[in-house]
Every structure is written in structure tokens, then in C-alpha cells.
Image (cartoon, rainbow, N blue to C red):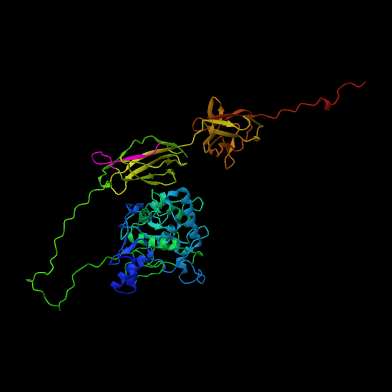
């Protein structure tokens, strides 16, 4: 892809020589550690790092992005330059979008302090991916007004990523598209999505959710973003393009010098797009030169145009020029090419397979941390250990379990014994089985799967906090509710499921068909309750109990996973006749 700097200069109809000089100057002045060669191609000081993240695991699927560069003037508004002055909207950031970036930085500083994520990096990526949510067109909750959807990733000039979300996010049931202000593809959002505004949803179209997800994505490995090499790797993992890296770094440096808040919806819209290589392309929003099209919910992205192919090279002919005699030898014969020596294999190149390094019995109670950590060993074909290899551990399946910090993905480097140990795995509230898959980063070898199971919370004892014998008249209702406390080895057992059943007797646990009962939502009698859980203090109060006309003594049995059990006696009887007071009875003695 030609550098976007060259494209701008071509559109201005300047010569190639001027373009190369201007690009070099612009790169040197705007992007840290970025230079340009004599042809205007950009290089970086760390020898052009690359990302080993495949498109389907990157944030954007390597989708197109905006290529506009920061303005050359200071990003800080001068006393005579207000937010409405020319050029200030490009340097400014819409208020809600800026707030989302800063809140995400604050959360990442708390959750992953070693990552050192600056909010200016989120702002730089947000600018390049969506023009700060298309100039801050968001509602009061931070959700974009109209969905921002990139081209479909159908392999036609882009990565090939077939549909993974049934079109839920992108409206496309055939292929995936990048979605939202931070341009996540659905397959990545499935594990990277976060709830940044506390509304209980993880929505890629919400700038708070998307900014927090982007922060966690950039911090998902053991990268320190205050280190330039790690910063470059993180940005390239978001979208694997050298031009993308340079553009993001340019905006990052610009925002670090200062910026200002502008009203939502007043930001300028970028016009250049990374896949627009045609001269005179339509730069209007939604046109051929726009980055991502803003669409209404449910709309299907329109057709996309593949990047133009470079013209085929050929030697020019000059029929009017002098001919050269075939017998005339060339003055400067081309020396024979040297045979390059093959580079020595890296440790990653030598990995043949992964072995389980002793991980067994991955079971944990909901909400607990798994007692054992997952470990994998990288080996050669001969079974020798391979150190200094990065292993990616990914939580796969329908589960809310995650590694410490809430991440579904972790990357760990093998030690001298070839072993990589994943971070601690934390069980969520969802019970059942799932898989953790280990793969070698940068090497295509079969993955290694670890089966894990989350079991429900347990309690080994239940105790009543009130009376263990309750009474009621036929057809009436019990005045006191049943409240119990669950414990496990003497400690409070919270979020434990309790089953309450009105049984026939202590010796017959069959559900009774008469006597006391609960009521369902329709007012009908039910004698078994499930799905009730203790609170943070291990307490549970049951709904009100009612009695039918059958007198007698009944048993309410409560049980928990783990062996907790409690029987409460319920009596249904007519009220006792009041005892007469002799002093108020009429006298029956004969008169004197």
C-alpha cells in the first residue's frame, strides 16, 4: 500500500521528487521515531516491528482506517482561538468521547498498573479508527448515533473473516465487519468486550464500553506501554500495518502536547482512508474516500472496493531514439547476485508441538480462583524443551470464567525448561465446562486444550434465624417469614442456591399435595421453590407461606449443594377456644 503521505501529495498534483522531500519532513516533524526513505516510504527506529496477531484475533481484523495527520499548529487553543475557530475541531476531542478515554485510563491504572496505558493512546486510535466516533456523534450515554461499520472482511482486498456473530453487531450474516468507535470485529469483541458505563451491557457501539475494551486489549499481554518497543507491538496488534503504526504515533504525540474539549457532534470528519489509492476519490463521509460508513441499526454494509492494483512495470520504448548495436557490450555489466545465507532459526521456529506440563483436575466453585494454574511446555520434534517462546492461552466456550484481571487471553514466555504458566484462572458465576487453549505465537502447530469445570457454590450447614416451628389457622397465612443462614465450614456461604420443599414427613421427602404452600406469580399454589440464593451475608428469606383447610403438622425442608439441610415444622390448627373468666360468668346459685 502506498504511504498515505504520498497519496495526499499526488492529490495536490506535485512531482514525485517534491513528494519524497515533503513526506520525509512531515514524518520527521509529526511522528516520533518515524523517518522516510528516498521514495517516501516510512520506517521506524526499531527496524519496523511486526505483529504476530492473526487478523481474526486482532481488534479490527486489519480493517481500513483514517489516514489524516494532525495539524501542524499547536493542539492547545490560543486565547484568540476558541473551539469554533478554524482547525480547532480537528485538534479537539468531543466531550463525551474524551471522558470515555480518561475513564478507561483510570480503570486500567487500577486493574493493570504495569501496563501504563495513557488515555492519549486511546484518543489516537479512536481518531484513526472512527474520527472520534465521527466527530462525537453520540448520545448522552455514549452510544453512537447510527452504527459505525467498516467494510465486510470478505478477502476481497481485506482479510477473510467469515461471520461469527450471526450479524448481531454488524448486520452481516456472511462476513464480519469492524464495528463501533474503536472498530472491533465481532469475534474479538466476544472476549474483549467490557461494560464501561455500568449499564450492564457490553456494546461495541458505546464509546465507554469500546474505550475500556480497547484499553484491556492493548494491555492483554505483559506489555509496558511506556516502553516504545512494547507500545509499537500493542498498536500493531490492533491493526497490523506500518502506516497505521506511524499514523497512530503521530496523533499520540499530538495529543500528548495537549488538547481541548469540544462539544459533542462538532468534531471534524477525516477524509483519507487507507484503502483509498485512487486519485480523485470521493472524500465525503460515506464516499469512496471515507473510512468507515455510519449506518443505522440493522443496516447491511454496502459493497466495498478493493484497493487498486499497481500498474504492471515495463520498459518504455523510444522508436525515435538511436539504436544500439547488438555487438556492443554493456559498459557496466550487472555483477552476479550474492547467494544469501539463510538466517538461523529462532526458538519459535524449532517448536514442533506443545505438551501439558502437569495440569490436571481443573475444577473450581463458582466465584473462586482455580487452585491450579495451567502450564504448557514447548518442545522440539525430539522432545527437547524450547525456551523464550511466547504461548497464548485463550479461554474458549460459553463461560464467564477469565484470567485474573478479567482477560480471556494471556501471553506468557516459556522459561529455560520450555514451560509457560498462565495467570490464575478465576471462575465466574456460570457453571459448566469450558476450554482453555494454548497456542504458540508466531508458529502454526496444533493447539493444546485444557478442560475446566465450574461447579455451583456450596454450603454444608443451614440454620434458622427465627422460630423453627411456625403455626397458622386453616385457610390463613403464616405471620412470620422463614429466614435461614448458610455457612461452609463455619464461614458465610454467599450466593448459594437453596431449594425449599414442603414434604410429607421427615422420613418421606416426597412433595406434599396438601397443607402449607407458596404462591407463584399467578397466585397458584406451589410446594417447591428453586433458584433462590443467599445474599452476601449468607442470608435468605423465603416468600410468605399460606395454609389450605387441611389441619395437621407439616415439614418444610431446605437443602443446599454441599450437604446443608434444615427442617422447619409447620402446624395448621384451629385457634384454641378462649378460657372463660369465672368472674364474668352469671351466678347460678338460688336466691336466699
Residue in front for this viewpoint, 228 or 350: 228
Residue 95 x/y as whole percent? 51, 62
Based on the displayed image, in which of its 4 quarters is residue 569 positioned? top right
Based on the displayed image, in which of its 4 quarters is residue 8 positioned? bottom left
Q: Is residue 354 magenta?
A: no
Q: Is residue 223 above or below residue 577?
A: below
Q: Which residues are magenta?
A: 372-386
Q: Is residue 382 magenta?
A: yes
> How many badges with numbers are in the image?
0
In the rendered structure, the answer to whether residue 495 lies left or right of residue 236 reads right
Residue 443 x/y as whole percent? 28, 48
Residue in front for this viewpoint, 534 or 422: 422
Q: Residue furthest right?
A: 592
Residue in front for this viewpoint, 87 or 20: 20
Q: Residue furthest bottom?
A: 320
Dominant secondary-structure state across the stretch colored magenta: loop
Residue 412 x/y as whole percent? 36, 45
In the rendered structure, the answer to whether residue 533 lies left or right of residue 62 reads right
Amino acid at each position: 500500500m502506498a504511504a498515505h503521505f504520498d497519496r495526499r501529495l499526488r492529490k495536490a498534483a506535485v512531482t514525485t521528487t517534491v513528494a519524497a522531500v515533503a513526506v520525509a519532513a512531515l514524518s520527521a516533524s509529526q511522528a516520533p521515531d518515524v523517518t522516510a526513505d528516498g521514495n517516501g516510504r516510512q520506517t521506524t527506529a526499531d527496524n519496523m516491528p511486526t505483529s504476530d496477531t492473526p487478523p481474526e484475533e486482532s481488534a479490527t481484523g486489519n480493517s481500513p482506517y483514517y489516514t489524516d495527520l494532525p495539524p501542524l499548529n499547536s493542539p492547545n487553543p490560543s486565547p484568540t482561538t476558541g473551539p469554533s475557530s478554524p482547525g480547532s475541531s480537528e485538534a479537539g476531542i468531543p466531550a463525551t468521547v474524551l471522558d470515555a478515554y480518561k475513564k478507561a485510563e483510570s480503570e486500567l491504572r487500577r486493574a493493570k498498573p504495569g501496563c501504563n496505558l495513557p488515555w492519549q493512546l486511546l484518543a489516537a486510535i479512536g481518531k484513526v479508527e472512527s474520527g472520534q466516533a465521527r466527530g462525537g456523534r453520540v448520545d448522552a450515554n455514549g452510544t453512537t448515533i447510527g452504527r459505525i461499520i467498516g467494510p465486510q472482511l470478505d478477502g476481497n482486498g481485506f482479510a477473510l473473516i467469515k461471520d461469527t456473530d450471526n450479524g448481531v453487531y454488524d448486520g452481516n450474516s456472511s462476513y464480519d465487519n469492524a464495528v463501533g468507535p474503536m472498530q472491533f470485529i465481532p469475534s474479538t469483541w466476544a472476549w474483549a468486550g467490557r461494560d464501561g458505563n455500568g449499564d450492564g451491557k457490553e456494546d461495541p457501539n458505546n464509546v465507554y464500553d469500546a474505550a475500556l475494551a480497547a484499553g484491556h486489549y492493548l494491555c492483554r499481554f505483559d506489555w509496558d506501554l511506556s516502553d516504545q518497543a512494547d507500545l509499537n507491538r500493542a498498536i500493531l496488534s490492533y491493526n497490523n500495518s506500518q502506516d497505521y503504526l506511524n499514523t497512530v504515533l503521530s496523533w499520540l504525540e499530538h495529543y500528548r502536547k495537549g488538547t481541548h474539549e469540544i462539544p459533542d457532534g462538532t468534531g471534524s470528519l477525516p477524509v483519507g482512508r487507507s484503502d483509498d489509492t485512487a486519485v480523485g476519490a470521493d472524500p465525503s463521509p460515506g464516499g469512496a474516500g471515507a473510512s468507515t460508513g455510519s449506518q443505522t441499526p440493522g443496516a447491511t454494509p454496502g459493497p466495498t472496493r478493493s484497493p487498486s492494483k499497481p500498474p504492471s512495470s515495463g520498459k518504455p520504448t523510444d522508436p525515435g531514439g538511436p539504436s544500439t548495436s547488438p555487438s556492443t557490450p554493456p559498459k557496466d555489466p550487472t555483477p552476479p547476485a550474492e547467494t544469501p545465507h539463510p538466517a538461523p532459526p529462532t526458538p519459535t521456529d524449532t517448536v514442533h508441538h506443545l505438551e501439558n506440563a502437569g495440569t490436571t483436575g481443573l475444577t473450581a466453585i463458582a466465584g473462586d480462583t482455580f487452585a491450579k494454574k495451567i502450564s504448557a511446555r514447548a518442545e522440539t520434534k525430539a522432545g527437547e524443551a524450547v525456551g523464550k517462546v511466547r504461548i497464548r492461552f485463550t479461554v474458549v466456550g460459553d463461560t464467564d470464567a477469565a484470567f485474573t484481571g478479567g482477560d480471556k487471553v494471556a501471553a506468557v514466555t516459556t522459561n529455560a525448561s520450555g514451560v509457560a504458566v498462565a495467570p490464575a484462572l478465576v471462575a465466574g458465576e456460570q457453571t459448566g465446562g469450558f476450554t482453555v487453549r494454548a497456542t504458540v505465537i508466531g508458529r502454526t502447530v496444533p493447539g493444546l486444550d485444557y478442560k475446566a469445570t465450574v461447579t455451583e457454590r456450596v454450603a454444608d450447614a443451614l440454620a434458622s434465624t427465627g422460630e423453627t416451628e411456625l403455626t397458622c389457622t386453616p385457610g390463613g397465612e403464616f405471620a412470620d417469614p422463614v429466614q435461614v443462614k448458610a455457612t461452609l465450614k463455619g464461614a458465610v456461604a454467599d450466593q448459594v442456591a437453596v431449594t425449599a420443599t414442603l414434604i410429607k414427613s421427615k422420613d418421606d421427602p416426597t412433595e406434599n399435595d396438601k397443607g402449607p404452600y407458596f404462591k407463584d406469580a399467578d397466585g397458584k399454589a406451589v410446594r417447591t421453590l428453586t433458584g433462590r440464593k443467599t445474599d452476601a451475608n449468607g442470608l435468605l428469606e423465603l416468600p410468605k407461606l399460606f395454609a389450605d383447610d387441611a389441619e395437621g403438622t407439616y415439614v418444610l425442608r431446605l437443602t443446599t449443594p454441599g450437604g446443608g439441610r434444615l427442617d422447619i415444622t409447620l402446624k395448621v390448627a384451629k385457634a384454641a377456644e378462649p378460657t372463660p373468666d369465672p368472674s364474668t360468668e352469671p351466678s347460678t346459685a338460688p336466691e336466699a
